Image (tube, rainbow, N blue to C red):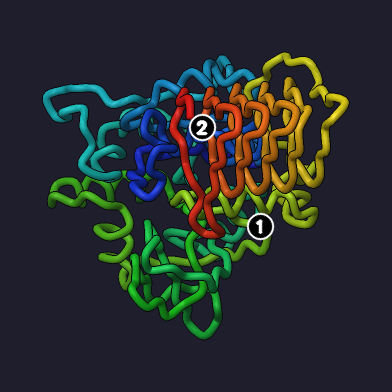
Amino acid sequence: MIQDAFGLIFTGEDNPLMHDLTLSRAVAAVPYGGRYRVIDFILSDFVNSGIFTVGLITQKNYHSLMDHLGTGKEWDLNRKRGGLFLLPPFSTKDNTGVYRGDIDAYHSVMQFVRHSNQKYLVLSGSHTLFNTTFEQIVKQHKETGADITIMYNEDPEFNPEEQNRDLRLLFDEDGRRVRELEWNPRYPRSNYRSCEIIIIDKALFEDLVEESYSRGGLDFVRDILLTHVHELNIMGWRYDGYVARIDSVNTYFKHNMELLKKKDAYDIYNMKHPIYTKVKDEIPAKYGEHADVHNVVMADGCNIDGTVENSILFRGVKVERGAVVKNAIIMQGSTIRSGAKLDHVILDKGVTVTEGRTLNGYEGIPLVFRKNLTI
């Protein structure tokens, strides 16, 4: 268990490729995997590592996120000492309340950072999912005397049309010290991609942010890491487990569908490191006389009397007799009326598909429908 580190999560990333899924919510609040939100995974990683002081910086569309997190009770973060600190934007003489970048955001919450008693800071984004603990990366950070340690994985897949916050690491011959960094490269020279986890001494973090802010810096990666890569001792720590980057509609669909594969599901839902979420008491899923269900992740409260294959169903979804749902993500409270046919579709909360309606997307191009529509 880590006792000398605290966490800071930035949830203000702008993800235009998420389209209607983030129309009224932050990426961190997007539902995932049948019963979770994206934020649940990184918060659970912190708690499973013994890090019980976590600050969460919000930027916009954060009401859904704050409603989900509440006091942090479900993550054991409602504590007298430490706990979960929600850090929404606010206006002061030095801060307009609108962050121009993550450096601006970090500078605005520097009081929280300074008041933390721990020596090390675990800095995180919010749209990368994995299930691990941080003991080994923090241990390596201490043993190597690194200024900064970046968690990364091997990610050979690359789509320049969906490039978003892509930090690539190039190493010295020892395979651990970072000699060069690439930020959103058009043609990456490395398959090693940051997992949005950075270990850094708190005092160094304060100095770097203050210096960059005073010079008009906006982005932590571009204006600090890339600027100082040859001056600082930056190390890498490799993670070989499953990593899901939720940075576009296509990656969101892909990583939800991969939960239907046993290997990937067992990795992200590793029982040694449970994933915590807001608990809602629902009745069990109900299967009607005509239900035909194959390879489906289904949450509580669903009522199924039609055909469902290769899909993710959230709480309270209703599929009527004669409806066919394939390769779909159906969020909470949505209803598929009799005779409707869905394939490669994402329905946000509370969507109703009327009788006999056919909705077909394609592999790599799923159809997305925003909240509370009747189609």
* Residue in front for this viewpoint, 273 or 36: 36
Query: Which residue shows up at 54% across the image and 56% down it?
Result: 362
Which one is closest to the eye, mark 2 or mark 1?
2
* Residue in front for this viewpoint, 235 or 124: 124
Q: Which residue is identified by label 2?
A: 348
- Count numbered badges in the picture: 2
Bin the neighbour count of mark 2 within 10 Å (Cα to Cα): few under 14, some 14-19, many 20 and up: many
Q: Is residue 52 left or right of residue 196?
A: right
Q: Is residue 157 left or right of residue 57?
A: right
Q: Judging from the image, what secondary structure is the residue with disc 2 in?
A: loop
Label at residue 242: 1
Q: Residue 159 appears at what percent x and percent y?
A: 43, 68
Query: Which residue shows up at 21% across the image and 27% down it?
Result: 97
Q: Residue 335 appears at what percent x and percent y?
A: 61, 25
Q: Judging from the image, what secondary structure is the residue with disc 1 in?
A: loop
Q: Is residue 262 visible?
A: yes
Query: Which residue shows up at 13% across the image and 49% down it?
Result: 216
Q: Earlier in the sequence, mark 2 or mark 1?
A: 1
Instruction: Identify the residue at the far right of this view.
Output: 289
Query: Which residue shows up at 61% across the image and 35% down it?
Result: 330
Q: Residue 26 appears at what percent x and percent y?
A: 41, 34
Q: Is residue 167 left or right of residue 89?
A: right
Label at residue 52: none
Bin the neighbour count of mark 1 within 10 Å (Cα to Cα): few under 14, some 14-19, many 20 and up: some
Quadrant placement of the N terminus: top right
Considering only vertical position in the picture, is 194 above or below 283?
below
* Residue in front for this viewpoint, 273 or 31: 31
Corner quadrant of residue 311: top right
Q: Which amino acid type corresponds to the residue marked 1 in the rendered image?
A: Tyr
Q: Which amino acid type corresponds to the residue marked 2 in the rendered image?
A: Asp
